[in-house]
Image (cartoon, helix red, strand yellow):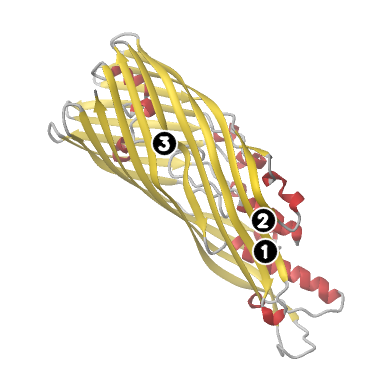
């Protein structure tokens, strides 16, 4: 019983609240992304992140800056259907009580997790001196929020049912009688998880001639996160009130890593082509554990104080093309590849993926007049998911995202971006012959929702 609960907690602690982009990377760094989606071939101050080489083609020398704020809200839902052990309970309350095993009964439950990041800031700066451009970016490039499961998870309820059966069967073999059905015990659990990767990027761009520019730079990534929660399971007072499990955790995690970044941008008449490559970031996160209570703490070694766990940021390739259909109408197309399978994760979880994350984007913007630009775009995301990668609190769903918004020219120096993006996810169904190691079959259907709103102000000094 102790081992089952300890292993279940390891699954519980894979929580990772993310909102856009790859499994470990957020790509929605600016309101211009939300309003158009595809920005990898656009020339603007937001290109310090999305197209750093293209920043060398900004029209004016001097300093240009931008400040962007986004709010993201997500739900993570589990529709659980599984079997649990059942007994016929004749003459309850009358001794001796001799339950008879009648097989299993089906259970259907629905769970909702809420993740939110009310404020996701990012800051951009570029200083252009003719052909040479210095640029800087600061933002939350991974994680970016807090996720809570206030009503527990099917993981724990299914395990408790199996463990009560296991314990009671052993007691029956010893000549004792213990009530066994699901309505004879109570389980309470709650979990808060948070993850943030703050990144500071510095780099140099150089315009080699009228049509070609390059970029070289790097990012310093700082990870901070943690988990706080509990699991408590016990028989109801009428049946003795025996404690079945008592688990508590309060753990803070930190880590850092460096990411080299390179890029190219080529302007050919009405076309603009851009490529960016971020190398893999070797990142380990270290625990600072204040509370760790479990039936067998040795089985929770990965979350003990001072332990390091791999959480690499995968290499990230962007290839983009933009075309000026008319002087006031522009269209972009873009491809992303996150090399997730070669980025180390806890317990080598990345090996279960069938491929790294693939994203396909198309966006367009139209200048209604000198002051107003309307835009929209769409993104399709395929994670290469597999059953062994998915779990109750760390699951992903292939999706498509739609973004809409506008850019408003406030003056010759100031530009306001407003964008809204929502994501539609494809449900993921995971069927198990032994549901959460209970020995009985079951199925989880994972689903998600996501909405993000953002504003930014670009200013040229």
Please give the name of the residue rendered at 58% of the width and 50% of the height, measured from the top-left corner: 227
Report which quarter residue 21 is drawn in.
top left
Q: Measured along the vertical axis of the image, is residue 303 above or below residue 311? A: below
The residue lying furthest to the right in this view is: 174
The answer to whether marks 1 and 2 mark residues whose Cβ atoms lie closer than 8 Å is yes
Report which quarter residue 189 is drawn in.
bottom right
Q: Distance between the residues labelled 1 and 2?
A: 8 Å
Percent of width and height locating residue 110: 51, 65
Q: Which of 164 and 290 is in front in this view?
A: 290
Please give the name of the residue rendered at 62% of the width and 59% of the height, measured from the top-left corner: 230
Q: Distance between the residues labelled 2 and 3?
A: 32 Å
Precedes in sequence: disc 3 or disc 1: 3
Q: Measured along the vertical axis of the image, is residue 255 above or below residue 209? A: below
Precedes in sequence: disc 2 or disc 3: 2
Q: Nearer the viewer, residue 204 or 312?
A: 204
Task: Pick the quarter of the image with the N terminus.
Answer: bottom right
The residue lying furthest to the front in this view is: 290
Precedes in sequence: disc 1 or disc 2: 2
Percent of width and height locating residue 295: 74, 58
- Say whether residue 98 is left or right of residue 369: right
Identify the secondary structure beneath mark 1: helix
Identify the secondary structure beneath mark 2: helix
* Disc 1: which residue: 159
Give neighbour class at mark 3: few <14, some 14-19, many 20+ (Cα, 10 Å).
some
Q: Is residue 383 visible?
A: yes
Identify the secondary structure beneath mark 3: loop
* Disc 2: which residue: 8
Q: How far apart are marks 3 and 1 (CA)?
A: 37 Å
* Disc 3: which residue: 27
Percent of width and height locating residue 297: 74, 52
Give neighbour class at mark 1: few <14, some 14-19, many 20+ (Cα, 10 Å).
many
């Amino acid at each position: 019983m102790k081992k089952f609960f300890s292993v279940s907690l390891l699954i519980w602690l894979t929580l990772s609240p993310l909102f856009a982009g790859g499994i470990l990377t957020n790509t929605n760094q600016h309101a211009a992304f939300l309003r158009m989606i595809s920005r990898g071939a656009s020339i603007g101050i937001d290109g310090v992140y999305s197209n750093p080489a293209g920043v060398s083609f900004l029209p004016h020398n001097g300093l240009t800056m931008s400040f962007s704020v986004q709010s993201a809200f997500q739900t993570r839902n589990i529709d659980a259907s599984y079997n649990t052990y059942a007994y016929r309970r004749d003459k309850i309350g009358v001794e001796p009580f001799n339950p008879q095993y009648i097989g299993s009964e089906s259970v259907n439950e629905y769970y909702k997790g809420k993740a939110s990041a009310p404020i996701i800031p990012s800051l951009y700066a570029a200083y252009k001196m003719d052909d040479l451009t210095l640029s800087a970016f600061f933002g939350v490039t991974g994680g970016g929020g807090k996720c809570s499961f206030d009503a527990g998870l099917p993981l724990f309820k299914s395990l408790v049912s199996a463990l009560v059966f296991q314990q009671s069967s052993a007691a029956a073999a010893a000549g004792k009688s213990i009530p066994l059905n699901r309505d004879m015990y109570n389980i309470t659990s709650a979990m808060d998880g948070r993850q943030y990767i703050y990144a500071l990027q510095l780099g140099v761009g150089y315009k080699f001639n009228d049509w070609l520019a390059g970029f070289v730079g790097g990012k310093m990534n700082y990870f901070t996160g943690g988990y706080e929660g509990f699991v408590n399971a016990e028989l109801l007072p009428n049946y003795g009130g025996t404690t079945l499990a008592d688990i508590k955790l309060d753990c803070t995690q930190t880590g850092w890593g460096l990411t080299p970044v390179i890029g190219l941008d080529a302007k050919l008449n009405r076309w603009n082509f851009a490529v960016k490559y971020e190398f893999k970031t070797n990142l380990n996160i270290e625990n600072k554990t204040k509370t760790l209570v479990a039936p067998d703490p040795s089985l929770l070694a990965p979350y003990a104080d001072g332990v390091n766990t791999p959480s690499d940021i995968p290499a990230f390739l962007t290839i983009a093309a933009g075309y000026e259909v008319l002087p006031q109408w522009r269209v972009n197309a873009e491809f992303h590849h996150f090399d997730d399978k070669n980025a180390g994760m806890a317990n080598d979880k990345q090996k279960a993926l069938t491929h790294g994350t693939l994203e396909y984007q198309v966006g367009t913007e139209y200048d209604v007049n000198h002051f107003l630009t309307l835009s929209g775009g769409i993104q399709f995301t395929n994670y290469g998911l597999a059953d062994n990668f998915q779990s109750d609190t760390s699951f992903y769903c292939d999706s498509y995202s739609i973004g809409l918004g506008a850019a408003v020219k406030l003056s010759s120096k100031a530009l306001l971006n407003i964008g809204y993006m929502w994501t539609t996810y494809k449900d993921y169904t995971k069927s198990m012959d032994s549901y959460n190691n209970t020995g009985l079959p079951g199925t989880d259907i994972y689903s998600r929702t996501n909405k993000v709103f953002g504003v930014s102000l670009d200013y040229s000094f």
